[in-house]
Amino acid sequence: MTNRTCNWMPWRSFHGALLFAVLLVNRSGAQAPGSKRDSPQFVDHSLLVAPEYPCTWPSFPFPRFQITRQRVIGPDSPYNIDVLLIDGNTGTQLDVPPHSVARPDLKREKSGPLGLAYTDKIEAWQFGGEACVVDVRDLLDQAPKGVSPLVTPKHVQRFEEQHRALRFGDVVLFRSGFSDKYYLPLPEGSRFVADALNRKAPGFPDPNPECMEYLATRGVMTLGTDSASMGPLPDLAEPTHYAGLKHGMIWTEGATNLGALPPTGAFYCMLGPKHQGGPYSECRAFSIVGGDVPKRLIESAKNKRAVDLSPTLAPNLPVTSPGIGAGQHRQVYLKIDFLYSEYLDLWHHTHLMDSMAGTHLVPPSFALPPEGAKIAYSPEVRGWLEEYEKKFGPRGTSSITTEKVPLAWTSGPVRVIDVRSLVGSIPAKSWPASPVIKPNHVEAFEKEHGALRAGDIVLFHTGHLDNHFQPQPNDGGVWTAPLAGKSEGWPAVGAETVVYLKEKGIRCIATDAPDLGGVDPQQALMTYWALGSKEMVGVEFLHNVDKVPEGGYFVFAPLKIRDCHGGPGRAIVLY
């Protein structure tokens, strides 16, 4: 991560059209590779995570993905709250060096400094780059049962002969079409992994160790495959992993829809929750194609101009809300070990966590019920709703869960509005209370820095997490003390400000505070009702905002979990 500044004001010349021009490209609607795209498009490369899909590794003892409705909108809660049991080997996923490289203190043959390069240590620039799609569809199913067809250096050289030599900053993507064809609901979905492991079907195409070594000579640091793993069956998985990871490579496994990309020129990115000590992680992969945006982002990643905005997730850190009063806390973040690797002296682990642990998305359906639902709020909340609707109109309904939020809503030119001057403005006798960010604060910013435009990501800089995010036992300043009225609450966005920003064409509001709503329950609920009714989203729980230079591009995408009312992820800024 580097903090050099550069001026990207040319972003402003086109970002007004970004929101309306950007389309989510799917398999049926994708333009032909190499076709001209005059405006930016977001292409989703992530598999849908849902219990009936083969989204988790099927071998014992890997735990199956689970989503639990901890609370639903009704008399007990005005929000839909979900809990996730999710392993890093779920759906589209990220591998980093400690997956195969042992820690240096172990002093083993495969030990080295990269054995400490966990998911929370990889620098933000390495998550993205120029997509170079190596077409290996001719290998699909071309092997005996239980055996993977091998991608060799010759396949990469074929790409280079047809297009250009690979280089540092490229993201090499192996496109076989495997996930497009075989990632299906169970039982048909057994063909994705289980049938190959059981030697009932050919394995997924994958590179051999020699291919990894060849890519290393080109300086390639980031890869991806639309196979279920980067490891060829039956016995080359570990050799291939180590051959790439020992060079510091990272990669996406289980990508999809790579056929929507041109051979070169697209910006590819993979972002996942920042798990402490994670040798792999669930992630969201996507690309941006067309227009001027990809070139600018590619240059930023290549020159290591990136800021990581997501705090680390760990059991001893205050990454989830303790609520107000007994019985109101959200699911605490837990790391659950389930399989020990003796060589790496490392446990494979899963996580049980709130769907809004750490950096996360707030979709419209978090606070809005689906159409037709008969909601019986508590008497107190009914009174708040009556007051809200008198001032802002109908609360509305929504079925926009996390996987339905367009990627274009959560990435774009970032406008950082500094509201740290509000800190300390609430007298102690009024606590618990949060200073309210009002429309006039936004207007003052616009007067000095220029008007907000459609497609901008508005990021409020409160400084709260930078000042208070600490491990136990010194973790009370983030949530506990403000909620209990022992300290001032963090600056919060008022519902009026949400309405004002929507009138400007803003779709996404972000904050480096724990949440956008603040410590007052009524004020918070009105903020989330306003976000939902205006079909806007929030990104909460960021830090390092003071390192974001003017003219940067905010990039965030939540995990693609079906019917989820939150969405863990990671946010970065490229500049």
Image (spheres, helix red, strand yellow):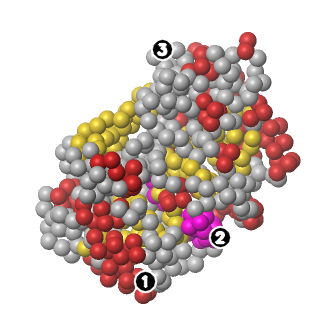
Q: Amino acid at mark 1?
A: Glu
Badge 3 local density, few (<14 within 10 Å), some, or many (20+)?
few
Mark-to-mark CA distance, 3 and 2: 52 Å
Q: Which residues are magenta?
A: 282-303
| 203 vs 243, nearest the viewer | 243
Judge the density around disc 1: few (<14), some (14-19), many (≥20) Cα neighbours within 10 Å. some
Instruction: Report the disc number at residue 326.
Output: 3
* Residue at the spot of label 1: 160
Residue 296 colored in magenta in the image: yes
Q: Secondary structure at mark 2?
A: loop
Camera-side mark, 1 or 2: 1
Q: Circle 2 sits on which residue?
A: 292
Q: CA distance from mark 1 to mark 2?
A: 24 Å
Q: Residue at x 62, y 36 (%)?
A: 466
Mark 3: secondary structure: loop
- Disc 1 or 3, which lies upstream in sequence? 1
Q: Earlier in the sequence, mark 1 or mark 2?
A: 1
Residue 394 place in picture, x, y as percent: 66, 33
Place of residue 224 in the rendered image (x, y in percent of width and height, measured from the top left): 39, 65
| Badge nearest the viewer, 1 or 3 | 1
